């Protein structure tokens, strides 16, 4: 049996949530409203500042699927393809790509495993040269998304997906490596023999210290010269930060 490496996507391979980074593209194509865009900006702020809980990940995944209802997989793939260079690629960390090269030198396939939609994860995996990707799968009827999940890949389901892949490909999970930033991915990290913690949230950093897991800090941009299109979500974040500070000061008074 052989080994493989599994990389979480958001805040592990990318600086922030891939789905939320695409919110501006969804708005441009009329797939979400201004109110939904503002909600995405607030979600992004909370995600950046403190990570996400199990419930927040689940709720965010469900909301993302509802946005797709009535759209086609080809429309989503086209949206992601258009956003790869200007929205997603500038968010890629350099350090995990160096790790990918090291795993390949040892003959280990590399995969992205994420609660983000399969079409988004697969596009990023293809662009970065990964061997495959596992993501949340949305139900399709009559060629259009229903807004309901066939496979929601978060928490324990994420670990189950890795186990299924390992069984299908003949990987020895005891020899496999997994990288993640969030305590919500604890089952995913525990599924392999070599868990590695990346830019961890407070809870995962504590768990890593208790268990002696390696902790890595990623910061370098893989594509420093990529021209980045600023999403309305990112423009809204400083405003939300200011409002949060003012609210905190008011409570202090």
Image (cartoon, grey):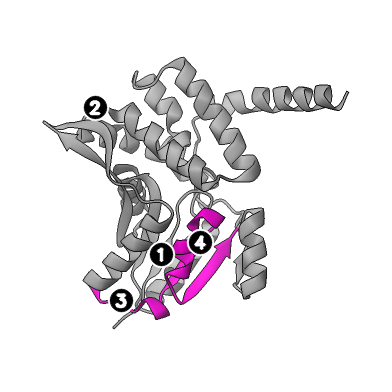
Magenta stretch encompasses residue 194: yes
Given residues 166 and 223, the one toward you in this image is 166
Farthest residue toward the left?
142
Magenta segment boundaries in residue numbering: 169-198
Give the residue number, with chain letter if any, for mark 4: 186
| Mark closest to the chain's N terminus, 3 or 1 | 1
The image quadrant where one finds the N terminus is bottom left
- Determine the CA span between mark 3 and mark 1: 12 Å
For residue 71, the mark is 2
**Label 4: few (<14), some or many (≥20) within 10 Å?**
some
| Mark closest to the chain's N terminus, 3 or 2 | 2
For residue 171, the mark is 3
Give the residue number, with chain letter if any, for mark 1: 6
- Determine the CA span between mark 4 and mark 1: 13 Å
Where does the image place residue 243, in percent across and percent down from the top left?
A: 71, 22
Residue at position x 46%, y 77% from top? Answer: 193
| Mark closest to the chain's N terminus, 2 or 1 | 1
| Mark closest to the chain's N terminus, 4 or 1 | 1
| As drawn, 211 above or below 226 | below
| Mark closest to the chain's N terminus, 4 or 3 | 3
Residue at position x 45%, y 73% from top? Answer: 102
**What SS does tag 4 mark?**
helix
Q: Nearer the viewer, mark 4 or mark 3?
A: 4
The image quadrant of residue 168 is bottom left
Given residues 33 and 81, the one toward you in this image is 33
Where does the image place residue 81, in percent across and percent down from the top left?
A: 31, 38
The image quadrant of residue 238 is top right
Given residues 176 and 251, the one toward you in this image is 251
């Amino acid at each position: 049996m052989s080994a493989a490496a599994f990389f979480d996507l958001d805040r592990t391979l990318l600086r922030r949530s891939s789905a939320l980074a695409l919110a501006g593209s969804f708005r441009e194509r009329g797939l979400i409203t201004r109110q939904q865009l503002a909600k995405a900006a607030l979600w992004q702020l909370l995600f950046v500042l403190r990570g996400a809980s199990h419930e927040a990940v689940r709720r965010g995944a469900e909301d993302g699927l509802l946005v797709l209802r009535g759209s086609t997989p080809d429309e989503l793939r086209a949206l992601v393809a258009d956003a790869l260079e200007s929205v997603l690629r500038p968010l890629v960390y350099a350090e995990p790509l160096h790790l990918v090269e090291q795993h390949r030198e040892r003959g280990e396939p590399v995969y992205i495993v994420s609660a983000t939609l399969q079409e988004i994860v697969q596009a990023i995996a293809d662009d970065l040269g990964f061997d495959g990707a596992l993501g949340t799968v949305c139900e399709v009827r009559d060629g259009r998304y229903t807004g309901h999940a066939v496979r929601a890949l978060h928490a324990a389901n994420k670990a189950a997906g890795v186990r299924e892949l390992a069984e299908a490909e003949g990987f020895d999970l005891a020899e496999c490596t997994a990288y993640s930033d969030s305590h919500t991915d604890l089952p995913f990290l525990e599924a392999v023999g070599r868990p590695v913690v990346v830019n961890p949230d407070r809870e995962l950093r504590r768990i890593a210290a208790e268990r002696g897991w390696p902790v890595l800090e990623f910061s370098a941009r893989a594509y420093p010269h990529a021209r980045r299109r600023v999403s309305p979500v990112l423009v809204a974040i400083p405003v939300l930060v200011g409002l949060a500070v003012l609210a905190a000061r008011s409570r202090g008074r």
